[in-house]
Image (cartoon, rainbow, N blue to C red):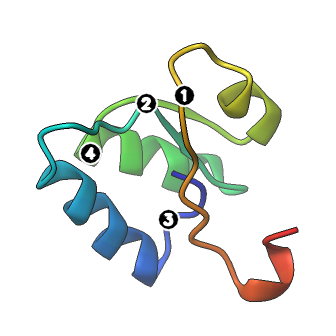
């Protein structure tokens, strides 16, 4: 999960409701937000996107960012 803002919470809850998915990493530019997300929803936390997406634990990423940051 990338981003822990308002829409991020909705996506985290959707992942929790799915038996076939789990949060492996919480990524945010604000380390305290990333840590809070991991404490609340599980997984590791980081501010480094590359650390998360290169992990063998990660199969997909959910981008909860403003549209102009998706690329």
User: Badge 4 is on which residue?
Assistant: 41
Q: Is residue 52 above or below residue 28?
A: above
Q: Residue at x 49, y 65 (%)?
A: 4
Q: Nearer the viewer, mark 1 or mark 2?
A: 1
Q: Nearer the viewer, mark 2 or mark 3?
A: 2
User: Badge 1 is on which residue?
Assistant: 58
User: Badge 2 is on which residue?
Assistant: 24
* Label 2, label 4: how far apart the Cα atoms are: 9 Å
* Label 4, label 1: how far apart the Cα atoms are: 15 Å
* Label 2, label 3: how far apart the Cα atoms are: 14 Å
In the depicted view, which residue is nearer to us: 5 or 11? 11
Decide which of tag 2 and tag 4 comes sooner along the chain: 2
Q: Quadrant of the C terminus?
A: bottom right
In the depicted view, which residue is nearer to us: 3 or 60? 60
In the depicted view, which residue is nearer to us: 21 or 6? 21
Q: Is residue 7 above or below residue 40?
A: below
Q: Nearer the viewer, mark 4 or mark 1?
A: 1
**Residue 46: image location, x then y, percent:** 63, 35
Tell me whether circle 1 and circle 2 mark residues in contact (CB < 8 Å): yes
């Amino acid at each position: 999960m990338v981003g822990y803002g308002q829409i991020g919470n909705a996506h985290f809850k959707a992942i929790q409701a799915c038996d076939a998915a789990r949060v492996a990493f919480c990524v945010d530019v604000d380390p305290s937000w990333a840590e809070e997300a991991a404490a609340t929803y599980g997984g590791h936390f980081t501010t480094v996107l590359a650390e998360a997406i290169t992990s063998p634990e990660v199969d997909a990423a959910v981008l909860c960012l403003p549209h102009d940051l998706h690329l």
